[in-house]
Every structure is written in C-alpha cells, then in structure tokens.
Amino acid sequence: MSRALIPGSFDPITLGHLDIIKRASMLFDEVIVLAAINPNKNYMLCTNSRVSLIQDAIKGIKNVSVDSFDGLLVTYMNTHSIDVIVKGLRNFTDYAYENDMALTNIRLGSKMYGMNAETLYMPCKPEFFDTSSSLVRLMLSQGADVSQLVPNNKLLLSFLQN
Ligand code: PNS
C-alpha cells in the first residue's frame, strides 16, 4: 500500500493546499495530512482548529486523513510506514525552501532509521500561485474577505472569534 504524507502548518488550510491534497489522493492509496506542531512557532490558530479545518476540507475524500505531530517528519514517517512526502510548489522561493527540507529529510531518515525519506514535488495550479496561508493571515488581520482563498471561511471565522 502506498502512503504519502502532506505536512505543513496549515495555518489555515487554503484552496491551494486542498488542490494538492486532492491530486495526491489520486496517486496514492492513502494520504495523511499532517499539521505540524512547532512549540517555537506562533500560529494564528491552535492545533485543534487547524486540524478541524483540514478535517472539514477533506470530508468526502475517502483515502485522506488528518493528524498532528510535534517532532521530526522522518520519525512520523518511520512510525506510520509512510513512503513519501508530497509538497506543492508555487515558485522558486518555495523550491529553495522545500529542497533544503527535502535534502535534510533524506539525510535524517537515512541516519536515524535507515529509510529513504523521499519528497515528491507537485506543481501548483496557476490559479493558486498567489494563495498562501500567510496572505490569508495578513488579509484577516485587516478585516478582508478571504472566502476565495480558503475552503471553509465560515468555520475559520468562527475559530477566530473564540
Ligand atoms: O507549511 P509550512 O510552515 O511550510 O510547513 C513546514 C513543515 C511543517 C513542513 C516543516 O516545518 C517541518 O517539516 N516540520 C517538522 C520538523 C522537521 O522534520 N523538520 C525537518 C528537518 S529539521
């Protein structure tokens, strides 16, 4: 069974993320969307809210599930028998960042677990080139409408009000 991991902050999940998740779900038997917990990072949304928004966005896609994790991706991959990380790329800036991560994961996976922690890149569709969680957060901070960038605007707003 082929298992892919789509890790990220998902603070919050965007329509660009969801497109990558849907496309990956057609290529692998199982896809796990992993909301990272980094204690040193200041998220706009708590872990439960980030996970709930992902859960809501993926409902109806049978082979996709969501989880959260505080630790190294290679440790999660080793524990859950995951073959590959999938990441969407919008531009060269994404590539530079993701490639450093991909090479680090190869190095760590091999050293810690003797595994091949490979990363596959998926090109982002042009309609999502300018969609990012950071843009959503910026727009929200200015009271702008983000309903065209996220899959579940109402739910997102309800989490921000609490
Ligand atoms: O959506 P983001 O913020 O770009 O996601 C970054 C994420 C969560 C994929 C990255 O920070 C990550 O891989 N975190 C887990 C810790 C880890 O394994 N880091 C890689 C080598 S130190």
Image: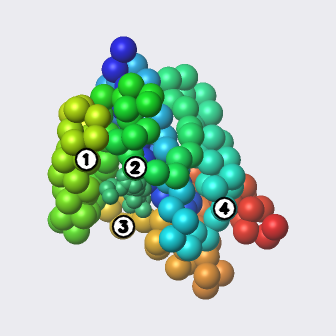
- Identify residue for label 1: 108
Where is residue 83? Give x, y as percent. Answer: 30, 28
Q: Which residue is at a point 46% across and 72% down the rendered structure image?
A: 134
Ligand 1 contact, mark 2 (Cβ < 8 Å)? yes
Residue type at mark 1 is Leu
Q: Nearer the viewer, mark 1 or mark 3?
A: 1
Quadrant hosting residue 118: top left
**Are the residues at dot 2 and dot 1 in contact (C-beta closer than 8 Å)?**
yes
Q: Which residue is at a point 34% across and 20% down the rendered structure image?
A: 2
Measure the C-alpha gap from mark 1 to mark 4: 28 Å
Q: Which residue is more in the foreground, 94 or 84?
A: 84
Q: Nearer the viewer, mark 1 or mark 4?
A: 1
Residue type at mark 4 is Cys
- Identify residue for label 3: 130
The crowding category of the residue bearing disc 1, from other C-alpha atoms within 10 Å (few below 14, some 14 to 19, many at least 20), is some
Name the secondary structure under disc 1.
helix
Residue type at mark 2 is Leu
Measure the C-alpha gap from mark 1 to mark 3: 32 Å
- Identify residue for label 4: 46
